[in-house]
Each structure stands twice: as structure tokens, then as C-alpha cells.
Amino acid sequence: FTPFQQPESHHGLYKICCLMRHGERLASIIDVSDIRRSVHLFPNFSAVVPREWTSSAVLELCSSFVVNLFSDRHAYLTIV
């Protein structure tokens, strides 16, 4: 995913997108000790959510997400 930039002005949340190269998603294998915490992502969609976006498929089908800063107190303090 892309690194955090400035929060979106209308809601103050960070938008992230899948990194792509030559039409394929970029991925990395990282050491588990580099993981600080999990985050809650909202798929970025328009007025209608596509039916094929199920909880098991949305990470593959959606290309951009919004990071939920308000999922818990620790997320807010860590991300902001």
C-alpha cells in the first residue's frame, strides 16, 4: 500500500491505495517484528457498494481504502 500522505480534508482520515507495477500489485515479505499493529480499513467506494465486495474478497477487488483512526483509542494515538 501507499504510505500515508495528508489526511483527506473532508473527513480527516488517511487514504491508502494498492501499489501497482505493470498491472500487478506490489507486495513485500516483512519480518513479524516490524509489525506495530493492525489497522481497520474502509473500502473507498461511491454511492453504491459493488455486490462482489465481500469480506473475504474486498482486499483483492478494491484499489483504495480509508484507514479508520477511530477503531480504538490506541489506533487513534498511534496513527495520529
Image (cartoon, helix red, strand yellow):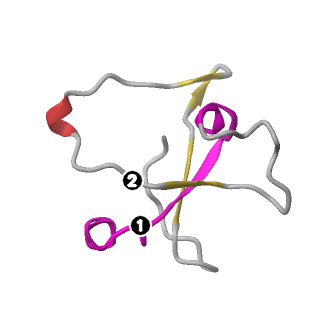
The residue sitting at the left extreme is: 33
Q: Which residue is mark 1?
A: 71
The residue that appears at 45% across and 25% down in the rendered structure is: 27
Identified at 48% across, 40% down, the residue is 1
Amino acid, disc 2: Val
Left or right of 29? Residue 50 is right
Across and down, in percent, residue 38 comes to 33, 49
Mark 2 Cα within 10 Å, few/some/many (few <14, many 20+)?
few
Q: Is residue 14 left or right of residue 75?
A: right
Quadrant of the image occupied by residue 60? top right
The residue positioned 72% from the left and 40% from the top of the image is 53
Look at the picture and state if 61 lies above or below 42: above
The relative height of residue 2 versus residue 60 in the rendered view (above or below) is below
Measuring from the top left, give residue 13's x and y in whole percent: 52, 70
Residue 43: image x %, image y %?
64, 52
Q: In the rendered image, which quarter is residue 66 located in?
A: bottom right
Residue range highlighted in magenta = 56-80
Q: Are marks 1 and 2 in contact (CB under 8 Å)?
A: yes
Q: Secondary structure at mark 1?
A: loop
Residue 18 has which mark?
A: none
